Image (cartoon, rainbow, N blue to C red):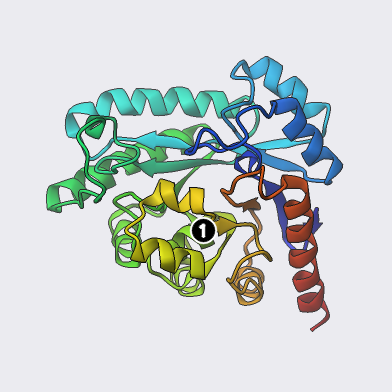
């Protein structure tokens, strides 16, 4: 599907959970890609069920006319003792994506995250370990170096502000953008994670529109999130409760967001996303609904 300046794809997380592994556990990559093809989607991100052999994956994508747009890359740049190793892994990751002509690398610092930081495994605690001044400096330096690697291979580092991490809140997004070089570090604007982190997504978009190189459109069921917060639920429990969904099935208003993307001249990929249990929320049904919802808004904006 392509309207205005940007192209719309779908993340395989709609079919198979990346963080909550039981969601869609028995779904095959063939089913995911076949569904995307039937839905007319031209782009996807890497998913945990997809083949890791680049030749095999490229063949499967090419025969369905689907582009691999990006792949999540977790980094630990806040730990300076790991930087050299992290950058080498980043280079390998970039080389893999380069075989598909992927334009962006979804990049996220996982240091301090209770869900994602391997150094916290088995240690308990649900609070993110926020960065001190040294931590911010190490993160910015590592991202700038990784961004240089990406740029040297024709790609762009797209920093993913993400729930349960050190760049989650609006002031953390602001600081990261201030401390990194715009020549090497772009922003992955995620509507759902912006709201989850305490921001108004439209405000994040307007403030950082010059840095946005990739977009995830994710909706939020606000009453479910409010109850989860009251119960002290962490990020993974929020997914299990159905906090996130696809555009048009939650409570965010995407009309002003899409209008702003058009107004600022955004011409990259827009990826539909929504981590929810596919047994309760059938992927094709919810993607079709999201496509109709987005297409209706875009048609109205074109006619305005």
Q: Position of residue 31 (x, y in %)?
A: 76, 30
Q: Nearer the viewer, residue 55 or 32?
A: 32
Please report the residue visible at 73 percent of the width from the left and 54 percent of the height from the top. 286
Q: Is residue 39 left or right of residue 110?
A: right
- Using a 10 Å C-alpha cutoff, classify the residue at mark 1 as few (fewer than 14 neighbours), some (14 to 19) or many (20 or more): many
Please report the residue visible at 60 percent of the width from the left and 41 percent of the height from the top. 13
**Secondary structure at numbered mark 1:** loop
Q: Nearer the viewer, residue 169 or 157?
A: 169
Q: Nearer the viewer, residue 222 or 178?
A: 222
Vertical placement of residue 173 versus 29, above or below: below
Can residue 206 be seen in the rendering of this structure? yes
Please report the residue visible at 68 percent of the width from the left and 50 percent of the height from the top. 281
Please report the residue visible at 26 percent of the width from the left and 31 percent of the height from the top. 121
Q: Position of residue 205 (x, y in %)?
A: 50, 68
Q: Is residue 106 left or right of residue 128?
A: right
Q: Which residue is mark 1?
A: 243
Quadrant of the image containing the C terminus: bottom right
Q: Is residue 270 left or right of residue 162?
A: right
Q: Position of residue 230 (x, y in %)?
A: 35, 66
Can residue 184 be seen in the rendering of this structure? no
Vertical placement of residue 265 versus 218, above or below: below
Q: Identify the image quadrant of residue 246.
A: bottom right
View extreme (bottom): residue: 304
Q: Position of residue 101 (x, y in %)?
A: 64, 33
Vertical placement of residue 51 versus 148, above or below: above
Vertical placement of residue 106 versus 290, above or below: above
Q: Is residue 155 left or right of residue 265?
A: left
Q: How many marks?
A: 1
């Amino acid at each position: 599907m392509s309207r205005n300046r940007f192209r719309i794809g779908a993340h395989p997380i709609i079919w198979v959970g990346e963080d909550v592994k039981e969601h869609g556990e028995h779904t095959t990559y063939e089913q995911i890609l076949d569904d995307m093809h039937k839905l007319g989607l031209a782009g996807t991100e890497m998913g945990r069920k997809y083949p890791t052999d680049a030749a095999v994956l490229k063949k499967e994508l090419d025969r369905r006319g689907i582009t691999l747009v990006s792949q999540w890359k977790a980094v630990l740049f806040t730990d300076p003792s790991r930087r050299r190793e992290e950058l080498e892994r980043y280079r390998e990751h970039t080389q893999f994506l380069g075989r598909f002509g992927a334009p962006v690398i979804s990049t996220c610092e996982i240091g301090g995250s209770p869900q994602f930081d391997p150094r916290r495994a088995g240690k308990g605690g649900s609070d993110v370990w926020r960065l001190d001044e040294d931590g911010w400096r190490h993160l910015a330096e590592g991202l700038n170096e990784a961004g240089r690697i990406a740029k040297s291979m024709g790609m762009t580092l797209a920093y993913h502000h993400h729930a349960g991490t050190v760049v989650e809140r609006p002031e953390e997004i602001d600081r990261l953008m201030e401390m990194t070089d715009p020549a090497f570090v772009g922003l992955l604007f995620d509507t759902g994670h912006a709201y989850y982190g305490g921001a108004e997504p439209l405000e994040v978009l307007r403030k950082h529109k010059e840095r946005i190189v990739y977009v995830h459109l994710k909706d939020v069921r606000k009453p479910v999130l409010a109850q989860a917060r009251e119960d002290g639920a962490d990020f993974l429990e929020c997914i299990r409760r159905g906090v996130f969904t696809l555009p048009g099935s939650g409570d965010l208003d995407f009309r002003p967001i899409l209008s702003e993307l058009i107004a600022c001249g955004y011409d990259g990929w827009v990826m539909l996303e929504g981590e929810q249990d596919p047994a309760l929320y059938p992927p094709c049904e919810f993607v079709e609904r999201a496509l109709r919802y987005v297409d209706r808004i875009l048609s109205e904006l074109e006619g305005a």
